[in-house]
Amino acid sequence: MTEMTPERWNATHEYTREVFGGEDQILAELIPAAEAEGFPSIAVGPDVGRLLMILTSMTPGRRVLELGTLGGYSAIWLARGMAPDGHLITIEYNDHHADFAESQFAKAGLADRIEVRRGAALDVLPVVVEELGQQSVDVAFIDAVKSEYPEYFRLVRPLIAPGGLVIADNVFGSGSAWIDQSDHHLIAGPDELNRLLASDPDFEAVAVPFRSGVLIGRRVA
Ligand code: SAH
Ligand code: MG
């Protein structure tokens, strides 16, 4: 078996970006504009973005929920996978991020289909859960505070429609923290979520080693 060295990992990542990382002008301009505003470089890349779009388009794609908007990059990918009557709610704590994302949604012609809810996910989620109702959400994308991942799932779980997806970013770790290196706070939450979904009898789940790991769980019961 060929060993997965850091060089091979990076080369695979670069290859994936080269072949599957195409993006239009709106998405290509968003990241440099966000970085010029001082936003951290932690948005998903075009490869994971495309995965989000494809997965969403494999569901009815009518109701999508995102936790952690940042500059709106992943939200635009998700929205592009939605049905024509689809609606995305994205929750963001930082007003500067929310303002910027709203301007990007307008630029992308998605202002009427993406709604930013401001506040901490754990405060806003119970309101959204009440509003949307059980088993009404086709895709929930979790990408806010890593230590809160298990709690997000407990709140979001009843919302997921039959056949619907729970997707989470950074589930093998983010930044310099990785599953096999430490029990750092960036790892414990995602690790617990991975295990929660893997052992949940109502879900089938797997995490793919794409960038820093993407967890995909599908409600099967
Ligand atoms: N999904 C985005 C990246 C999100 S980064 C993308 O890939 O394009 C994480 C975001 O979560 C940041 O914008 C941060 O401000 C926000 N955030 C931090 N704490 C939060 C909280 N408690 N509730 C909701 N959002 C939070
Ligand atoms: Mg992320």
Image (cartoon, rainbow, N blue to C red):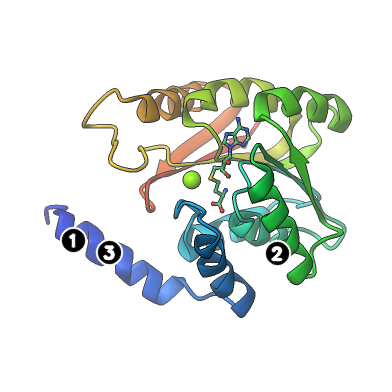
What is the secondary structure assignment of the residue under circle 3? Answer: helix
Query: Dot 3, crowdedness within 10 Å: few (<14), some or many (≥20)?
Result: some
Disc 3 and disc 1: Cα gap in Å?
A: 6 Å
Quick check: is the Cβ at mark 3 less than 8 Å away from ligand 2? no
Quick check: 46 left or right of 18?
right
Which residue is at a point 65% across and 36% down the rendered structure image?
A: 93
Q: Disc 3, disc 1: CB below 8 Å? A: yes
Residue 42 appears left or right of 10: right
Q: What amino acid type is highlighted by mark number 1?
A: Arg
Q: Position of residue 57 (x, y in %)?
A: 68, 58
User: Which residue in the protein does label 2 denote?
Assistant: 104
Sequence-wise, the earlier of marks 3 and 2 is 3
Q: Is mark 1 within 8 Å of ligand 2?
A: no
Return the disc, 2 or 1, that comes first in the chain's sequence: 1
Quarter of the image for residue 213 reads top left
120 is higher (above) or lower (below) than 106: above
Gap in angstroms between the C-alphas marked 3 and 2: 30 Å
Rounded to the nearest whole Å, what is the CA distance between mark 2 and mark 1?
Answer: 35 Å
Q: Amino acid at mark 2?
A: Gln
Inspect the image, locate mark 3, and give the three-letter code of the amino acid beneath it.
Thr
User: From where the camera sits, is residue 157 visible?
Assistant: no
Percent from the top left, x then y, of residue 103? Answer: 74, 62
Q: Is residue 71 left or right of residue 44?
A: right
Q: What residue sits right under mark 3 in the picture?
A: 12
Instruction: Give the answer, above or below, for where 186 lies relative to 45.
Output: above
Residue that label 1 marks:
8
Instruction: Give ligand 1's quarter of the image.
Output: top right
